[in-house]
Image (cartoon, helix red, strand yellow):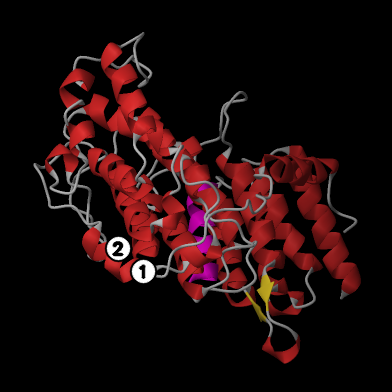
Amino acid sequence: MKHLSHTLCLSISLSLLALPACKSKDAGAEGDAKTDADAKAGAAKAGEPATGGNAALAAGSVTPPGGRSASDNLAPLVELVAGLEACKLSAEGGLDGECAGFDEFYDAVSAQEDDKAVSRTLVNFLGDQNEVVRWAASDRLGSLDLQSYPALLAMALAALATETNEEISRNIAGSFGVLEDSVLANPSVQAGLTAALVKVEDDEAFDHLLPPSSACTTEACWGLLVAAVKQNPSLRNRAEAAYALYDVEGMHPEACAAGIELITVLSKEAPAAEDAKFDPHEWASSTLYELAHFESGEGDAVKTCAAVLPGLIDEAIAQAKAGTLHESVFYAVLELDQREDKKDFMAKLITLAETVAAGAKFNDEMKQTANGALADYKAEG
């Protein structure tokens, strides 16, 4: 496109560099065939309400962990809880110095031979009222294989959805590894993962939770990503989820609308500071790029997000008239004139370019780009 400035090329390049690297699918344990039985046997009885990990979960198919009082805990580990309570956490959320109680707990967990019983007990401890107990349990989860026990994995996700300590959240999320497609297909895991994806704000924990595109092959899994795009409280996490959503081999019915909603929200944010880790306008432009190129199927059955693009241009026009349209968003919207179906919204692009060219609040480079676009459009007829 002749009228595009060097700034646009740089803007797109920076946007793409900001996107997460593709995740590879690590080998993991297969989910067992006794999920329903596990869901009944592994579900702990509810203990006292906890401020961190034992709040009721909205998804009714997932039982939250029961804390130290759960009847199916391993007694030798429960006996060591009092020693854990003598330990302290640092301001960063990790263990503050050495603590004999944790060392004893660590050794006791390692000495147990029943992997499932240990997993069940540690997951129950994620629902305890005491933060140190939850931290100790989360610290040891990585040595186990929760993917072999989907019901317990779902309970851990339920705890993660309500955990307030960032370090504990990271420990829990990082303990699962890359979730296998067979595990992702489990309804309880889906419910727990959805609850976590729409609640977890910490970016490190959130990134651990995002399923890789190679394993996210069903509409149910795509729905997890849509939920995160629409509901996570962190704009950064919503943008990461959108990138993952437009990398899968399939289209959820709400995928396009969710993306447009996010792009609109990002485009209205205040400009980011130079040293900011997250630039909403760069992510708005890169998300638009991904959405505009997203398609599913082949031939006459191909699906795209073309139907929502005119509405997005209308939003850009409204921001241009208000003098608030950011340059990176403007350049990204102009890129839509490279589409084969541009005739469907060319009149809107012309209006956008005219509005920016005449706008008093836009810099010279934006105006030059707008005038260049108008000249190209006129030459094309």
The answer to whether residue 144 is seen in the rendering is yes
Marks 1 & 2, CB-CB < 8 Å contact: yes
Name which residue type carries label 1. Answer: Lys
Label ID, residue 38 = 2
> What secondary structure is found at the residue carrying circle 1?
loop
Query: Where on the picture, by quarter, is residue 212?
Result: bottom right
Name which residue type carries label 2. Answer: Asp
**Residue at the extreme left of the image, as rendered:** 48
Quadrant placement of the N terminus: bottom right
Q: Nearer the viewer, residue 61 or 119?
A: 119
* Residue drawn at (87%, 76%) of the image: 381
Say left or right for 254 vs 76. Answer: right
Q: Say above or below: 320 vs 302.
A: above
Q: Which residues are magenta?
A: 254-268
**Residue at the extreme bottom of the image, as rendered:** 300
> What secondary structure is found at the residue carrying circle 2?
helix
Can you identify the residue that label 1 sits on? 34
Q: Nearer the viewer, residue 289 or 142?
A: 142
Distance CA(mark 1)–CA(mark 2) = 6 Å
